[in-house]
Image (cartoon, grey):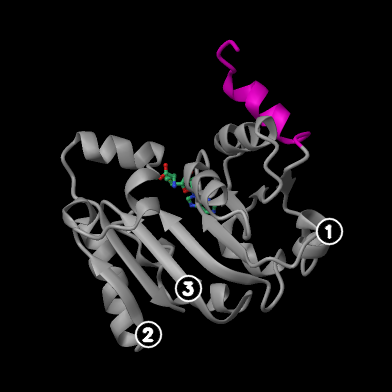
Amino acid sequence: MGKVGKLQKFAEVTVFENCYERAVELKGKWKSDVFQNDNPITVEMACGKGEYTIGLAERFPDRNFIGIDVKGNRLWKGAKYALEHNMTNVAFHRLMIGNIEEYFDKGEIDEFWITFPDPQHAKKRKRLTNPMFLSRYRNISKDGAIMNLKSDSTRFYEFTKEVIAEQELTLLEDCDDIYAWDDIPEHLANIQTFYEKMWLEQGKKIKFLRYVL
Ligand SMILES: C[S@@+](CC[C@H](N)C(=O)[O-])C[C@H]1O[C@@H](n2cnc3c(N)ncnc32)[C@H](O)[C@@H]1O
């Protein structure tokens, strides 16, 4: 297949059957209407090209996965791969994360991933793990839902640990250099996003936090 331009990707994702755009009508209905099963749902926020959504969905067929990003041309890559590989436990949803409560119901989500978010050095209010975002995630998730964060940014990682401590959340894993971790879980080592590859080439250490929301 030849190189597909940005505009064509924007156009194609609007007709991909596994891609949804600000789908308020699906609030509370993702299991029944989209996945047609009762399996738990994991959401990847700011998924970019969807490498984590796809990689996890391939490894965990008994779970459903939704990749969320505001940029349709980025979602295109993951969505296209999922269609070509007949993956029925994957969907992509184009929306602004700040409005996520409009699109999912209380208790609908079981687990979250955030991979290599923009660090937002100057704007704490835009950091996807700040208290305001966490309360939005809680409003759409089951009690005891899990958050996973993979990041190159020391500042973002330290900021998130401060929020975890302030809110007295249960920290399940904390690693400041995952490739030096003897027992690194397979899916942490072997699923690498576009941004992770870029940061690894620049010699950055990759950090990981897993905690109860
Ligand atoms: C640095 S990229 C990381 C993408 C991907 N996770 C990766 O590791 O390659 C950050 C992504 O966050 C998305 N993003 C940033 N803020 C967002 C928001 N408020 N709502 C939805 N997507 C957002 C951007 O469109 C972009 O794709």
Camera-side mark, 3 or 2: 3
Circle on res. 169:
2
How far apart are labels 3 and 2 at the CA level? Answer: 11 Å
**Residue at 32%, 42% in the rendered image:** 196
Residue 3 magenta-highlighted = yes
Task: Provide residue 9's location: percent of width, then percent of height.
Answer: 64, 27
Question: In the displayed structure, does residue 29 sit left or right of residue 3?
Answer: right
Residue at numbered disc 1:
33
The residue type indicated by label 2 comes to Leu
Label 2 residue SS: loop
| Label 2: few (<14), some (14–19) or many (≥20) C-alpha neighbours in 10 Å | few
Q: Which tag, 3 or 2, sits closer to the chain's start?
A: 3
Residue 126 magenta-highlighted = no
Report if the CB atoms under discs 3 and 1 are less than 8 Å apart. Answer: no
The residue type indicated by label 1 comes to Asp
Q: Which tag, 1 or 2, sits closer to the chain's start?
A: 1
Can I make out residue 188 in this image? yes
